[in-house]
Amino acid sequence: MSANPTGLPPRYLRTPEAARFLSLSGRTLEKHRTYGTGPAYRKLGGRVVYSIEDLQDWADRGTVTSTSDPRGSVLPAKRHDDKTLASPGDLPR
């Protein structure tokens, strides 16, 4: 992906570029958007765009330091019941 004519990096990415940024398929990112489990996005006209900061923040929510840590708060791209969508602090230990 090339920089814009002013030499600044793009501020917003369309779905295919955002998916590559996250190392996901475009279809997986679309599913996350549908189920409300993905990164924040914006609608500009009829286009869906993601800010790089929102993508990074969403990816950072999945950070863990070992396999014994509770899972991060990034959920799989599928429907979830209300208990699954609870914040990590609400989960039993």
Image (cartoon, rainbow, N blue to C red):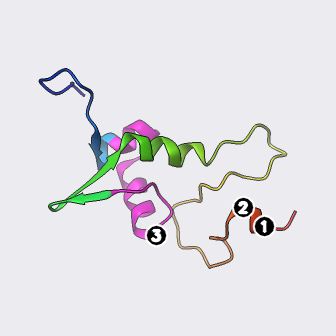
Crowding at mark 3 (Cα within 10 Å: few <14, some 14-19, many 20+):
few
Question: Which label number is shown at residue 35?
Answer: 3
Report the magenta stretch's main SS.
helix
Residue 49, x across and y down, in percent:
28, 51
The reply, left or right, for residue 70 in relation to residue 48 is right
- Residue ranking furthest to the right: 93
Residue stretch in magenta: 18-41
Above or below, 20 against 26 in this view is above
Structural distance between the alpha carbons of marks 3 and 2: 18 Å
Residue 26, x across and y down, in percent:
35, 50
Q: Secondary structure at mark 2?
A: helix
Asked if residue 35 lies in the magenta stretch, the reply is yes
Residue 65, x across and y down, in percent:
76, 37
For the residue marked with disc 3, what is the amino acid?
Tyr
* Disc 2 and disc 1 in contact, CB within 8 angstroms: yes
Residue 43, x across and y down, in percent:
24, 60
Q: Quadrant of residue 88?
A: bottom right
Residue at the spot 38% in from the left edge and 38% down from the top edge: 20
Residue at the spot 57% in from the left edge and 59% down from the top edge: 76
Structural distance between the alpha carbons of marks 2 and 1: 5 Å
Q: Which residue is mark 2?
A: 88
Crowding at mark 2 (Cα within 10 Å: few <14, some 14-19, many 20+):
few
Asked if residue 62 lies in the magenta stretch, the reply is no
For the residue marked with disc 1, what is the amino acid?
Leu
Whether residue 24 can be seen here: no
Question: Which label number is shown at residue 61?
Answer: none
Q: Which residue is mark 1?
A: 91
For the residue marked with disc 2, what is the amino acid?
Pro
Above or below, 65 against 47 in this view is above
The reply, left or right, for residue 75 in relation to residue 25 is right
- Residue ranking furthest to the left: 5
Q: Quadrant of residue 18?
A: top left
